[in-house]
Amino acid sequence: MNVYVRDLTRELGRRGVGVDVFTRSQDEHVPHVLHDLGYGNRIVHIRAGPEVPMARTELVEYLPLFMEGILQFSRAKRLTYDLIHSHYWLSGLAALNLRDLWSTPVIQMFHTLAVMKNRVARSEQDTESTIRVDAEKRLLREVDRVVAATQAEVAQIQWLYKIGTEKVIVIPPGVDTSHFYPIAKDEAKEFAGIPQEKRVILFVGRIESLKGIDTLLRAIAQLVDKGVFRNIPFGLLVIGGDADISADDSNGEMVRLQDICDSLGLGEIVSFLGKCDQDILKYYYSSAEIVVVPSHYESFGLVALEAMACGTPVVASETGGLVFLIRDGETGFHVPAGDVDALADRLARLFQDDVLLTRLGSQAAAYAKGYDWAQITDQILDLYGTLLPRSA
């Protein structure tokens, strides 16, 4: 979501559209106004409660302070806004209240849906609160337009929330193809510090059970047992979370995954690299033979799109937006979510067929160009135009 907001704002700036991005301050040492988005567009960190990270359910009580901070900023700068484009349910609630004061249309994008996450939750920790579910239902009824990433999300809104979809329009996220593009493997590996002879499978994403990393680990173990990687220097790289913090401080899923690695004898094969800056990710994508997205739920799957833009085929769960984003047999493969055998089969097929790997990678890069932010922003601006007077 952060990447989406950043890249869309930059592209809007190129088109002469002024944007202020309001978010709650989580660090008192970060300036409250940052010009990191180019073209005069700003990130404004609003003081609303303690300036530290907080659980999302706790943030609800600080929404009035957040909205008041936005109002104070706009008054101090003598600003008026033509439109509010809110992201995630908490921001949507703030947007509805601001609309009442400003008479400004609201476009909402959820990025993930609570009811869908609860349907696939694998533990109580993964479940979303009734507060969020009720908020999303209210937003679907009251905002002026809803942007869905795929037709799958439209169907989920219709079936799971029992709410009409007349106000919903499908506009997928984009990818910055000036940043994510194919890099020669030898150059990418040199930058990433990966031995040239080493062949890599890559996972990128949050470290949580919904991401299905345990399925990937078990599939890799199966391939090791079958000798697929015999005499091949091989590694699975996991990017996401904090790799170097202690077990006491680590989240439960990271500890569980490391325990699985130990029990499967994958300690020398799997590397947890922790978080990775977006500027460096492209080198890892280009270094990898395959990027795997084994999630139990993805509303879209931006990691898969970034990987394809870098010319790397993707093996992904057949769920949510990934069904629409990955073209099975053309830019990668689909497998049923949680199916270890199917995932192992597809990985083995790709690893043992360099011609297929090269063909899928080339087709993936060409396909991803259709999601370049310039084209996606055209669609967003068309949507804005339906809600704004011609003068705006």
Image (cartoon, rainbow, N blue to C red):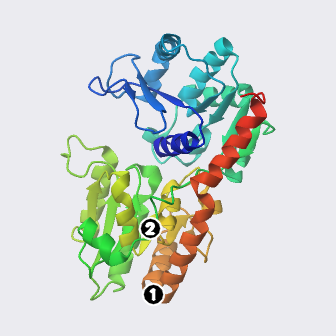
Q: Position of residue 202 (x, y in %)?
A: 38, 66
Inter-mark Cα distance, 1 to 2 = 15 Å
For disc 1, the marked residue is 354
- Corner quadrant of residue 219: bottom left
Q: Position of residue 322 (x, y in %)?
A: 59, 59
Q: Position of residue 3 (x, y in %)?
A: 47, 45
Tell me if mark 2 has few (under 14), some (14-19) or many (20+) residues whose alpha carbon lies within 10 angstroms of its own. many
Q: Are marks 1 and 2 in contact (CB under 8 Å)?
A: no
Closer to us: 153 or 227: 153
- The image shows residue 101, relative to residue 322, as above or below, that is above
Q: Amino acid at mark 2?
A: Val
- Image quarter of the C terminus: top right
For disc 2, the marked residue is 291
- The image shows residue 290, relative to residue 13, as above or below, that is below
Task: Tell whether 23 sits left or right of 326.
Answer: left
Q: Secondary structure at mark 2?
A: strand
Closer to us: 325 or 319: 325
